[in-house]
Image (spheres, rainbow, N blue to C red):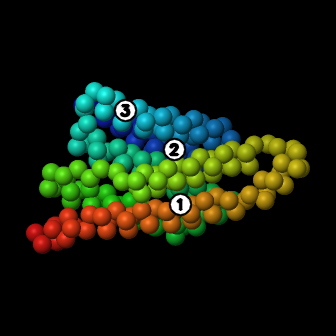
Amino acid sequence: MTLANKITLTRTVLGIFLFFLIDKSSLTFLILAFCVLIISTISDYFDGKIARETNTITKFGAIIDPYADKIIVFSCYLAFADIPELNIPLFAIFLIIIRELSIASLRVLAALDNYVLSAEKSGKFKTLTQFITIYLIMIYLIISTAPIENNTIKNIIEKFKNLPSYLVIFASLVTVISGILYISNHYKMIEKQWKK
């Protein structure tokens, strides 16, 4: 197994841990989860960089890399949904999961024809949007969980209490739109598979 793929698999495991760390809802675990999130994000950059520079880009890596991202996204959003104070709408998470599973299936279909579907601009923007919303919600969670005595800061936190739900809804819309674009761009390949 290549070094890049080992890093990617490690990121997948870290993504699973994220769910349990966030779901604890304690300040210590949330800070730890935030650190794990940062490490995961950095490793995502380095595994791709290493694969390109060492010319070790593999089909396994091309499939498992976006899978690792999905594990992180699902873990965070589902953990957020389990925290009542955030009031995260489940329909938004459902749409994100449906989109991600659909595109993952499309990648498998392509792999059956020995064709690797590379990431598109809309997909990269979607992933960026998802991770930005996750980071913002994590920051909000940490601040709102911290023992703050200052009333001014408490009032500011209260004003932003609906921000997490709005962020997830926005991320779901971007995710669905990118999925529609992805499917339309590869419709011929899907049609080809239907005829087999």
Q: To which residue does mark 1 refer? A: 171
Disc 1 and disc 2 in contact, CB within 8 angstroms: no
Label 1, label 2: how far apart the Cα atoms are:
19 Å
Label 3, label 2: how far apart the Cα atoms are:
24 Å
Q: Which of the two labelled residues, at mark 1 and mark 2, occupies the earlier sequence position?
A: 2
- Label 3 secondary element: helix
Residue that appears at 74% across and 49% down: 144
How far across and down, in percent of the image, does residue 9 sit? 35, 38
How far across and down, in percent of the image, does residue 127 sit? 46, 52
Judge the density around disc 3: few (<14), some (14-19), many (≥20) Cα neighbours within 10 Å. some
Label 1, label 3: how far apart the Cα atoms are:
26 Å
Along the viewing direction, whichever of 181 and 76 lies nearer the viewer? 181
Q: Which of the two labelled residues, at mark 1 and mark 3, occupies the earlier sequence position?
A: 3
Question: In the rendered structure, which amino acid carries the disc numbered 1?
Answer: Ala
Q: Is residue 170 left or right of residue 10?
A: right
- Label 2 secondary element: helix
* Quadrant of the rendering where the N terminus is positioned: top left
Q: To which residue does mark 2 refer? A: 18
- Label 1 secondary element: helix
- Asked whether residue 75 is in view, the answer is no
* Quadrant of the rendering where the C terminus is positioned: bottom left
Q: Which of the two labelled residues, at mark 3 and mark 2, occupies the earlier sequence position?
A: 2
Q: Is residue 22 left or right of residue 16?
A: right
Residue that appears at 64% across and 58% down: 164
Residue that appears at 25% across and 32% down: 56
Q: To which residue does mark 3 refer? A: 49
Question: In the rendered structure, which amino acid carries the disc numbered 2?
Answer: Leu
Disc 1 and disc 3 in contact, CB within 8 angstroms: no
The relative height of residue 9 versus residue 84 in the rendered view (above or below) is above
Q: Nearer the viewer, mark 1 or mark 2?
A: 1
Question: In the rendered structure, which amino acid carries the disc numbered 3?
Answer: Lys
